[in-house]
Image (cartoon, helix red, strand yellow):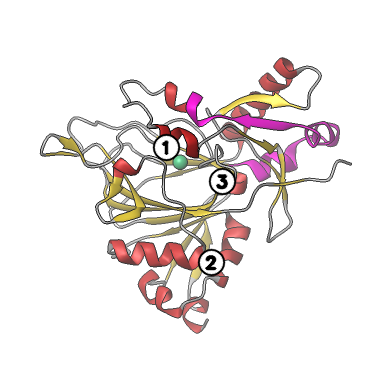
Amino acid sequence: MAYASCANFQPLSNSLGAGVTNFDVKHYIKSGSAEKFHDELCEYQLLCFRNQELASCDLISLTKLLGPPLPHVLQQYSLSGSPEIYVLSNIVENEKPIGNPREGFGWHTDLAYMQKPAAYTILYGVEVPEVGADTLFASLYKMWDWMADDEKSYIRKLRGRYSYLKLYEQRENAEPLTEAQKQRTPDVTHPFARIHPKSGREGLYIGGDDFVAVEGSNKPEHDFNRIWSLFHDTTVRFHYNHKWQPNDLLIWDNRGLIHTATDYDTKNSRRLIWRTSVEGEEPIASKVK
Ligand SMILES: [Fe+2]
């Protein structure tokens, strides 16, 4: 990995993230190994590469280098001929949206509603507004480290229930899900205390608006509110704000990280982001101590 060893990783904040310089992702794809990426993602959770000239085939190759692609349920918003690439956009061509204009607003971790949620998400900025449409990140690992031991012990016994159907119902004017889309997304449960499969790091795991209930609790309503409180505290205490430039490439590890897009002037600005996801493992629960 001589090429990757030239790269320079600079922390982006006290909580998470590294900016990577002296690195051409296209050259890296040709190396055929993602070992360096996995290591750096364990350490920083989020990697940011500026000024990357990528075609859709490059993005797919990079995704496959990191693991099996996880195509989005809403295939009507995939890039033509590339089911792996989910298009986020407010652009309308021939009276038809070229991507999903609603996706990603509100704090969440990607695809928590799947049995095997996304390990990694990759976003590539094809067109980005000059103002707004930032992506904010916050570290659930940092939150876990900050929590008191007795609260960690309590949370290790609990699981969260996730529902894509409930999440989807909240979207105004969204077209109804097909039966096939519903069947692909039954409710699932995941532990709140989750172990990273590579680093062994323990962290808090909470999805977002797809999180609908606490299981394993004698006081589910109280615990539901407490989990949301921890989630909110994370966004306040341990965050990083990414301001986009065209040709930015972001890669992050969803296991200990939540994120959200911010608003922008959708009438006068154009936003076109390509997104891919890498399938992860079924979340590994911490041992109850
Ligand atoms: Fe997301």
Of label 3 and label 2, which has the lower sequence position?
Answer: 2
Tell me if mark 1 has few (under 14), some (14-19) or many (20+) residues whose alpha carbon lies within 10 angstroms of its own.
few
Task: Write down the region rendered in magenta.
Answer: 139-166
Q: Write down the quadrant of residue 221 in the picture.
A: top right
The residue type indicated by label 2 comes to Phe
How many angstroms separate mark 3 from mark 2 (CA)?
Answer: 19 Å
The residue depicted at 65 percent of the width and 48 percent of the height is 282
Q: Which residue is mark 1?
A: 180
Q: Is residue 84 left or right of residue 212?
A: left
Mark 3 element type = loop
Asked if the residues shown at circle 3 and circle 2 are in contact, with their CB atoms under 8 angstroms apart, the answer is no
Asked if the residues shown at circle 2 and circle 1 are in contact, with their CB atoms under 8 angstroms apart, the answer is no
Q: Is residue 67 left or right of residue 152?
A: left
78 vs 223: above or below: below
Residue 218 in view: yes
Query: Does the magenta-highlighted stretch encompass residue 159?
Result: yes
Of label 1 and label 3, which has the lower sequence position?
Answer: 3
Q: Which residue is mark 3?
A: 117
